Amino acid sequence: MRLHEGNVTFELDVAGYQFPHLHDDPLDAEWLDVRLRLRVGGHDFTQVDPALTAGELVALTGWLREVALHLPTFAAWRGPTLTTRIDFTEPNLAFEVRGGHPTGAPATLRVCLAAESRPPFHALLDRFPREGDPDEVWVDFALDEEVLKATIGRLEETLRRFPVRTGV
């Protein structure tokens, strides 16, 4: 996943399975070492952490496909902000789609970072005290059909390299 807007870039890539030698342990065989990189202006943060399972990567890809199906609804929504969010077992990474974007894009893709994935320059990022994690920060990116298609394609390629191994 590669997102870019203005002086902000976010990248998510899978470095490998956390336990490459395990193939049949339904709890540990699916954990992926995820490489996160966030650049904001002259600040750069890179981290490799077991932040997702292969099954959660499948869920993220499916969630984005569902967002793509409903992108016109996000664009046309005129009431209170329309949102959908996906969280994972580890509370350090989440994604949210919100209707509209200041650039006129149909939606905003919000990347939420907390705990060990919160960058040392977190004071530069937006945040609000959230019940689940008051220290969560985020970066927003314009989301349109082209960005969604590219993001889903990259995630599908990652899933081909790192599939669910235990059927869980």
Image: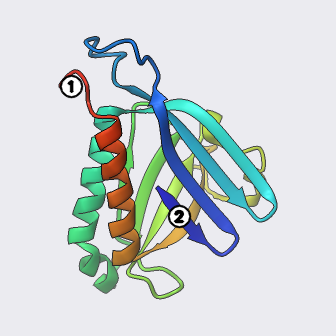
Using the numbered discs, state the Cα–Cα distance from disc 1 to disc 2 in whole angstroms.
29 Å
**Residue 144: mark in rendering:** none
Question: Compared with residue 74, is residue 50 higher up or lower down, i.e. above or below?
Answer: above
Crowding around mark 2 (Cα neighbors within 10 Å: few <14, some 14 to 19, many 20+) is: some
Of callouts 1 and 2, the N-terminal one: 2
- Residue at 41% from the left image edge and 18% from the top image edge: 20
Q: Secondary structure at mark 1?
A: loop
Residue 3 is labelled as 2
Which kind of residue does numbered mark 2 sit on? Leu
The residue wearing badge 1 is 168
Q: Which residue is painted at 29% across and 42% down in the image?
A: 160
**In the depicted structure, whether residue 119 falls above or below residue 85:** above
In the rendered image, which quarter contains the C terminus?
top left
**Of the pair 17 and 111, the residue shown nearer to us:** 17
Compared with 103, 23 (above or below) is: above
From the top left corner, tell me how far across and down residue 140 is, in percent: 55, 66
Q: Please name the residue shown 44% across and 17% down the image.
A: 19
Say above or below: 144 vs 95. Answer: below
Q: Amino acid at mark 1?
A: Val
Q: What residue appears at the point 77 percent right and 44 percent down from the top-left corner?
A: 120
Label 2: state its secondary structure.
strand
Q: Is residue 137 left or right of residue 89?
A: right
**In this figure, which colouring scheme has been used for the structure?**
rainbow
Please tell me in which quadrant of the rendered image residue 98 appears: bottom left
Task: Assess disc 1: are there few (<14), some (14-19) or many (≥20) residues with their C-alpha within 10 Å of its C-alpha.
Answer: few
Is residue 64 among what the camera can see? yes
Residue 26 image point, x, y percent: 26, 16
Is there a contact, CB below 8 Å, between mark 1 and mark 2? no
* 147 relative position to 73: left or right: right
